[in-house]
């Protein structure tokens, strides 16, 4: 192995850096389009959304240098400490956080607000990589699987209690990482079944679902035996009753949670998504307007700064979670497809580089980064085009906000530092 050199830019993957720069610049152009007014104002000004975002982008440069300054050994050695510090930042939100839109998710520093949950993802990815790369760690043992689940779900629960369900949902992305490292598909299968039962219970009600499942479970647990040359259909009633009790408890729990724990606007979003109700002027207004805005762009778009729906503020908070609707209107199908292609190339590049790592820590962290990006991009775009309910998940490098931009910048450039050192002896 070669000895590590002091040049922090040596061996960096410039394709990933180029993709990062393109996405950030294109994202800012769309924030500019979504927040520009007829009044002429300075670009570097906190008085406008695009001015603030440009300052956040410029401040990302020293942040990148700081991230690259530390070598791979630092991130592996101090992964647990960084993770614990990030958990403390989440805990401090409860007594000291500023409440915005009903959630205590921000620290207010006067001219600047920071959202810790955007940074915790990177440190959770480091902690998961640290645990799973331990030479004595056997992922086939249930107790070791539980350790990984604890690391993932502690920050998720702390974020959920803020409450910020969208940011908490992101931590499900780590199951792709665990699956890559040997976790059985049974967990993911159970997760898919649980989500399916959840949606079916909302759509048809607990009574209908329970009755239908009893018939299905009975049929699936039936088996054929032969006696005296004749076939007999038999049932293992112990399995039928046992499975049914577990499933029934889950379904009844879903019904109770949905009706008594979820707030009305959460219920409305699911019912609109499932087609149980239409509310284009109320809770479904954002999604409906976003879909109309994207459709109006057609194949080639209306042109930069020529989106009349964007300029007319038809989509509330369009510069944040609904920024993709600006792309759809002004850049059309071509621009929207290009954005998706850029994100796809970035994720495939990260996975490719991760597989070339001789160090397990770097590979696992890379898969964590790719999974988080995939989850964010899929859910955000799905939300904007009406496939998913509105859950408040930003589009990486695109959506307005310093915390989001810096959080993803840290995520990416930690990986770039790990990748640059993969040929050295850590």
Image (tube, helix red, strand yellow):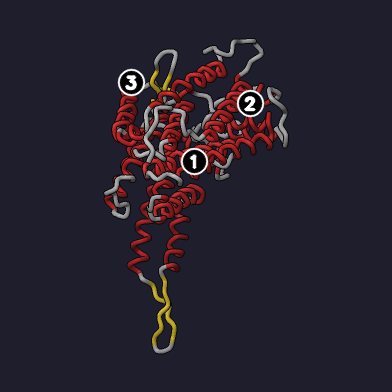
Neighbour class for label 1 at 10 Å: few (<14), some, many (≥20)? many
Q: How crowded is mark 3: few (under 14 residues within 10 Å), some or many (20 or more)?
A: few
Q: For marks 1 and 3, give the one nearer the viewer.
A: 1
Q: In which quarter of the image is residue 160?
A: top left
**Viewer can see residue 258:** no
Q: Nearer the viewer, residue 57 or 189?
A: 57
Residue 282 lies in quadrant: top right
Q: In which quarter of the image is residue 27?
A: top right
Residue appearing at x 51%, y 21% in the figure: 57
Q: Can you name the residue that lies furthest to the bottom here?
A: 228
Marking on residue 301: none
Q: Relative to the observer, which residue lies in front, 108 or 99?
A: 108
Residue that label 2 marks: 314
Q: Spatial distance from mark 1 to mark 2, Cα to Cα?
A: 36 Å
Q: Is mark 2 on a helix, strand or loop?
A: loop
The earlier-in-sequence mark between 3 and 2 is 3
What residue did someone put label 3 on? 96
Q: What element carries label 1?
A: helix
Marks 1 and 3 sit apart, C-alpha to C-alpha, by 37 Å
Q: Look at the numbered discs 1 and 3 and tell me whether their residues touch, using CB distance below 8 Å.
A: no
Q: How many numbered marks appear?
A: 3
Q: What's the residue at 49%, 48% (across, down)?
A: 199
Tell me the mark number nearer the camera, choosing from 3 and 2.
3
Front-lying residue, 391 or 265 = 391
What residue lies at 51% left-to-right and 31% top-to-bottom?
A: 394
């Amino acid at each position: 192995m070669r000895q590590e050199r002091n040049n922090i830019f040596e061996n960096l993957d410039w394709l990933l850096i180029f993709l990062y720069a393109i996405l950030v610049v294109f994202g800012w152009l769309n924030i500019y389009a979504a927040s520009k007014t007829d009044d002429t104002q300075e670009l570097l000004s906190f008085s406008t959304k695009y001015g603030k975002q440009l300052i956040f982008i410029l401040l990302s440069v020293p942040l990148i240098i700081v991230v690259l300054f530390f070598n791979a050994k630092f991130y592996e050695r101090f992964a647990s400490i960084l993770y614990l510090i990030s958990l403390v930042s989440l805990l401090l939100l409860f007594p000291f956080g500023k409440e915005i839109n009903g959630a205590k998710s921000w620290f207010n520093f006067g001219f600047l607000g920071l959202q810790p949950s955007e940074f915790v993802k990177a440190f959770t990815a480091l902690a998961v990589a640290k645990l799973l790369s331990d030479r004595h760690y056997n992922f086939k043992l249930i107790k070791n699987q539980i350790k990984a689940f604890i690391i993932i779900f502690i920050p998720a629960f702390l974020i959920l209690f803020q409450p910020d369900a969208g940011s908490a949902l992101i931590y499900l992305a780590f199951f792709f990482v665990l699956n890559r490292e040997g976790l059985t598909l049974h967990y993911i299968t159970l997760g898919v079944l649980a989500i399916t039962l959840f949606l079916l219970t909302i759509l048809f009600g607990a009574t209908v679902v329970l009755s239908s499942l009893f018939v299905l479970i009975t049929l699936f647990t039936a088996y054929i035996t032969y006696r005296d040359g004749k076939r007999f259909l038999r049932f293992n009633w112990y399995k039928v009753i046992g499975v049914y009790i577990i499933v029934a408890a889950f379904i009844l729990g879903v019904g109770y949670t949905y009706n008594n724990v979820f707030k009305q606007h959460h219920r409305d979003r699911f019912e609109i998504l499932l087609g149980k109700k239409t509310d284009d002027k109320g809770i479904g207004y954002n999604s409906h307007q976003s879909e109309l805005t994207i459709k109006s762009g057609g194949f080639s778009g209306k042109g930069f700064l020529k989106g009349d729906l964007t300029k007319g503020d038809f989509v509330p908070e369009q510069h944040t979670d609904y920024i993709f609707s600006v792309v759809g209107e002004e850049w059309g199908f071509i621009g929207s497809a290009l954005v998706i292609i850029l994100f796809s190339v970035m994720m495939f590049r990260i996975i490719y580089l991760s597989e070339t790592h001789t160090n397990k820590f770097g590979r696992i962290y890379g898969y964590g980064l790719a999974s988080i990006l995939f989850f964010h991009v899929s859910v955000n775009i799905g939300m904007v085009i009406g496939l998913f309910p509105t859950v408040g998940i930003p589009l990486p490098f695109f959506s307005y906000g310093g915390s989001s931009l810096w959080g993803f910048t840290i995520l990416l450039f930690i990986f770039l530092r790990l990748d640059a050192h993969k040929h050295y002896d850590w």
